[in-house]
């Protein structure tokens, strides 16, 4: 998303248009364009080409200035970004419950300092439909790009000054490309989040654009077959948007199916007739404000159901309306924020540009810091009833917090034993609760039920530590799960192991979950896998909105919630069943679909029981909800 000159290449603007529309459509309705997220990869290739050509052209002319370059970058990127962050923070305070206020504030601080890719690498799987609800999640790609802006000029300028030969630059870029794509192909298989979010594993996507920029500088562009090449490239890229999906190994070698067609067109001199240019003008315009459109689209999608909970037209109409609103909002941001500051003649900050950036920076930092420190004190939304607030507030007793459920980094099995969390009896049904906070939320309900049954309840649960054996940036979590599984295998003292967690909505992670279950089965215990809740991220907000008439909650909001709530839970259960014959053999594991517990059918998913909320937030159940689930589990 580089600054473009007044005399733009129409083909590059069209690529920007295609890329941003692919991402927006993917985020509005992933099923329409399963590989639409690859639009970001197109942006990276475009940025690599434009930046490399711009830097090397100026180095050759002797007009290159690192200071001027970074000033232009700040003027180009930060006013629009900081404006969107400010509006997002205000919207979060107004519409979000306290837990989401805090997480949004933390992600905004990361976005302000262009490190949001690191933040989400540590906290969020991009394709996890249950946790990818941060309105600033999309800024991960800006973090990658802004970090690229910092190092690439230094590499190109320094290397060209030392070797004074573009042949050496060719070799350098090819080496960076090779190292990056090999590393990416390796890590995407063992630690997909690391490969997805971090620059070293994305550098090849910029480098391929940079390589073609050097080719153009050396040999010029070629108009022969330019139109045919461009059309074929668009066709191939569009096919990738439809064929690839969230289970594809991206980034990695597969990304070349998108990157190569796009990059080849950089070396073409696409000449179009005036009539064709008129036809392409709307697409070029979208390419012009693609950066602003990218900034605004995701917050709009996240806040949409909170702003318009009763707006439930035909699905196609809803998709079109969302797309139009995103386009209009992106254009307004481009017209009134991005363009005025970017097009100022001086390379130095004018008082207006400097004032805008500084004021927005201070505002965002002050508000974000306040939100982080005072999130628990927000009464948002104002119409929450006392009952709903109690449901939303975290209850330590519900989780056995700091006794059998830990938020510490390192937790030994011995600590669980010392706290009385691991105990078995030969005369009782010995049940182990294993997982993260999603598992721990059932602790109180299980222990209460055990009093009237002949059960002994044990618990191994750690915050944000899903019970899967996938390589994770959270090494403590990985080690914790290995220790827990090893203990279970060696003890062989449990009759039933209940496994639950915030399972990512991705096929690969479910395969890793299968490996966990296989290892647990070696303990000779029966396994009960609890699927994800029937849930929607706006449940608490809507319950609060209609708290004045709780008996009518169902009929007034199910039309909006039912499809998403039901589909996510049922899809998980179905896919676990389909994966089992291919990837793992489970003889003693029972998979429980939460849609069977919460829903009579797609239109009757419960949110309340006796007027009390089953949920405390978009991820966790309230004590009432946990008790509701436990009482319906087929435990004999």
Image: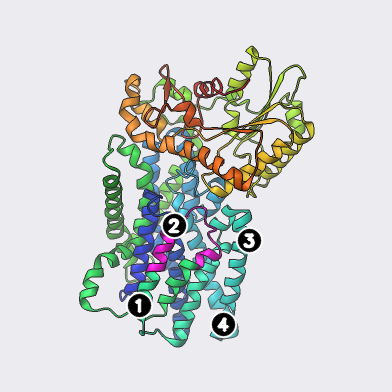
Looking at the image, residue 79 lies above or below residue 124? below
Disc 1 crowd rating (10 Å Cα; few below 14, some 14-19, many 20+) is few
CA gap, disc 1 and disc 2 = 24 Å
Q: Considering the image in quadrants, where does the N terminus appear?
A: bottom left
Q: Is residue 537 left or right of residue 587?
A: left
Q: Which residues are magenta?
A: 235-256
| Whether residue 9 is situated above or below residue 507 in the rendered picture | below
- Quadrant of the image containing the C terminus: top right
Label 4: how many Cα within 10 Å (few below 14, some 14–19, many 20+): few
Nearest to N terminus: mark 1 or mark 2: 2
Indicate the position of residue 409 as horizontal and vertical percent values: 67, 40
Query: Earlier along the polypeptide chain: callout 4 or callout 3?
Result: 4
Q: Nearer the viewer, residue 419 or 94?
A: 419
State which tag comes first along the sequence, 4 or 1: 4
Q: Is residue 359 visible?
A: no
Label 4 to label 3: alpha-carbon separation: 34 Å
* Residue 533 sits above or below residue 248 on the image: above
Mark 1–mark 3 CB contact (< 8 Å): no
The secondary structure type at the circle numbered 1 is: helix
In front: mark 1 or mark 3? 1
Q: Which residue is mark 2?
A: 35
The dot on residue 186 is 3
Query: Which dot marks residue 161?
Result: 4
Disc 4 or disc 2, which is closer to the eye?
Answer: 2
Q: Nearer the viewer, residue 402 or 607?
A: 607
Q: Are marks 3 and 2 in contact (CB under 8 Å)?
A: no
What whole-number distance in Å separates the C-alpha atoms at marks 1 and 3? 35 Å
Q: Which badge, 1 or 3, is on the more N-terminal residue?
A: 3
Identify which residue is drawn at 61% across, 40% down. 466
Mark 4 and mark 3 residues within 8 Å of each other at the beta carbon: no
Query: Label 1, on which residue?
Result: 228
């Amino acid at each position: 998303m580089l600054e473009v000159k007044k005399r733009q290449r129409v083909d590059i603007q069209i690529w920007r248009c295609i890329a941003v529309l692919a991402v927006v459509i993917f985020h509005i309705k992933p099923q329409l364009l399963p590989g639409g997220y690859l639009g970001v990869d197109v942006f990276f290739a475009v940025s690599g080409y434009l930046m490399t050509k711009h830097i090397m052209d100026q180095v050759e002319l002797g007009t290159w200035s690192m200071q001027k370059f970074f000033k232009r970058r700040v003027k180009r990127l930060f006013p629009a970004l900081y404006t969107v962050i400010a509006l997002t923070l205000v919207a979060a305070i107004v519409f979000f419950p306290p837990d989401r206020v805090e997480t949004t504030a933390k992600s905004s601080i990361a976005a302000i300092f262009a490190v949001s890719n690191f933040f989400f690498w540590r906290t969020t799987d991009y394709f996890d439909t249950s946790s990818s609800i941060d309105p600033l999640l999309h800024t991960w790609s800006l973090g990658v790009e802004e970090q690229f802006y910092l190092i690439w000029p230094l590499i190109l300028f320094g290397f060209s000054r030392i070797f004074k030969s573009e042949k050496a630059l060719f070799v350098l870029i090819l080496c960076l490309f090779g190292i990056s794509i090999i590393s990416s192909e390796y890590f995407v298989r063992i630690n997909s989040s690391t490969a997805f979010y971090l620059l070293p594993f994305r550098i090849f996507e910029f480098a391929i654009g940079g390589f073609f920029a050097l080719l153009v500088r050396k040999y010029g562009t070629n108009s022969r077959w330019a139109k045919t090449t461009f059309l074929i490239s668009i066709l191939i890229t569009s096919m990738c948007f439809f064929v690839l999906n969230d289970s594809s190994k991206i980034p990695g070698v597969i990304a070349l199916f998108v990157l190569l067609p796009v990059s080849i067109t950089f070396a073409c001199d696409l000449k179009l007739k005036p009539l064709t240019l008129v036809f392409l003008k709307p697409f070029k315009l979208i390419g012009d404000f693609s950066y602003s459109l990218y900034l605004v689209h995701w917050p709009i999608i996240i806040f949409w159901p909170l702003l318009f909970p009763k707006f439930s037209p035909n699905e196609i109409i809803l998709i079109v309306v969302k797309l139009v609103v995103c386009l209009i909002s992106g254009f307004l941001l481009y017209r009134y924020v991005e363009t005025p500051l970017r097009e100022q003649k001086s390379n130095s900050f004018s008082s207006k540009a400097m004032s805008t950036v500084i004021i927005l920076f201070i505002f965002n930092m002050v508000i974000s810091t306040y939100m982080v420190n005072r999130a628990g004190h927000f009464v948002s939304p104002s119409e929450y009833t006392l009952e709903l607030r109690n449901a939303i507030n975290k209850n330590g007793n519900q989780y056995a917090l700091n006794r059998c459920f830990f938020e510490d980094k390192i937790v030994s099995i011995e600590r669980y034993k010392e706290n009385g969390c691991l105990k078995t009896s030969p005369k009782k049904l010995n049940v182990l609760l294993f997982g993260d906070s999603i598992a721990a939320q059932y602790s109180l309900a299980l222990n209460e039920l055990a009093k009237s049954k002949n059960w002994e309840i044990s618990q191994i649960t750690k915050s944000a530590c899903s019970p899967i054996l996938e390589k994770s940036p959270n090494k403590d979590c990985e080690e914790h799960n290995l220790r827990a599984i090893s203990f279970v295998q060696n003890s062989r003292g449990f009759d039933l192991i209940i496994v639950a967690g915030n399972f990512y909505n991705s096929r690969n992670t479910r395969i890793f979950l299968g490996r966990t279950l296989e290892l647990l089965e070696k303990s000779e215990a029966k396994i009960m896998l609890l699927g994800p809740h029937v849930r929607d991220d706006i449940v608490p907000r809507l319950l609060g909105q209609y708290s004045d008439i709780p008996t009518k909650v169902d009929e007034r909001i199910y039309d909006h919630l039912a499809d998403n709530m039901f589909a996510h839970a049922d899809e998980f259960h179905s896919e676990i069943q389909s994966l089992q014959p291919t990837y793992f053999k489970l003889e003693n594991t029972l998979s429980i679909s939460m849609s069977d517990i919460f829903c009579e059918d797609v239109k009757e998913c419960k949110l309340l029981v006796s007027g009390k909320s089953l949920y405390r937030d978009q991820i966790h159940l309230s004590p009432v909800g946990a008790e509701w689930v436990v009482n319906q589990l087929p435990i004999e």
